């Protein structure tokens, strides 16, 4: 198999948290030997949707094996997620509940999961599949959780 490609879509490059997420993604990509592309949506949901769809619809040799994203708007891009599932592209949603995950997990061979913070921002709530791989019961700071997501996607896409 060729080198895994992961697209990371973040809301903006003008925010310390998002910059830390990008650095964490790059760090894990180097560790795992995967190719990573980071795009920023400039706090625009339409831009984000278009960027991700363009990647999903690209030629197979350019298409990412997985997408990790933090939604800009109120939804977690359910139609874009369905396009990813149809193309066999893994999908990880950050900091947003995505009620379509269970459905797409059943219908796609690619990994689908979400990671959200609880109301008190003390623990990361992992989906069933990610929880199985968490070594410390799901209690991780945000940047560590992001590293686990990249690692999980890399394992699931092999």
Image: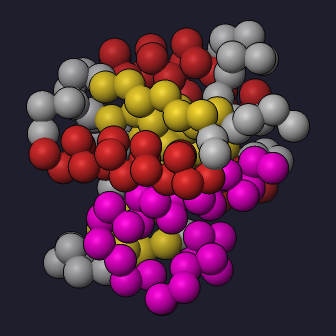
Is residue 75 left or right of 153 when viewed as pictured? left
Residue at 55% over, 28% down: 80
Q: Quick one: 12 or 36, which is closer to the camera?
A: 36
Look at the magenta stretch and give its main secondary structure: helix
Residue interval drawn in magenta: 129-158
Residue at 72% over, 58% down: 155
| 153 vs 123: above or below | above
| 79 vs 91: above or below | above
Residue at 37% over, 83% down: 139
- Locate residue 106: give its quadrant: bottom right
Is residue 25 left or right of 2 when viewed as pictured? left
Give x and y (percent) for residue 123.
31, 80
Give the image's coloring scheme. Answer: secondary structure
Determine if residue 107 is in view.
no
- Locate residue 129: give its quadrant: bottom right
Is residue 130 shown in magenta?
yes
- Locate residue 87: give its quadrant: top right
| 45 vs 125: above or below | above
Residue at 21% over, 74% down: 121
| 22 vs 97: above or below | above
């Amino acid at each position: 198999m060729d080198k895994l490609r992961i697209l990371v879509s973040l809301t903006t490059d003008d925010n310390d948290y998002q910059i830390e997420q990008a650095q964490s993604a790059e760090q894990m990509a180097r560790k795992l030997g995967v190719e990573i592309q980071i795009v920023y949506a400039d706090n625009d949901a339409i831009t984000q949707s278009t960027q991700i769809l363009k990647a999903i619809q690209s030629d197979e040799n350019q298409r990412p094996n997985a997408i990790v994203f933090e939604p800009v708007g109120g939804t977690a891009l359910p139609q874009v997620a369905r396009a990813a599932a149809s193309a066999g592209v893994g999908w990880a949603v950050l900091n947003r509940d995505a009620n379509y995950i269970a459905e797409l997990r059943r219908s796609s061979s690619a990994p689908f999961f979400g990671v959200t913070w609880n109301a008190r921002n003390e623990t990361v709530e992992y989906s069933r599949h990610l929880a199985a791989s968490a070594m410390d019961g799901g209690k991780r700071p945000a940047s560590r959780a992001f590293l686990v997501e990249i690692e999980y996607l890399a394992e699931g896409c092999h």
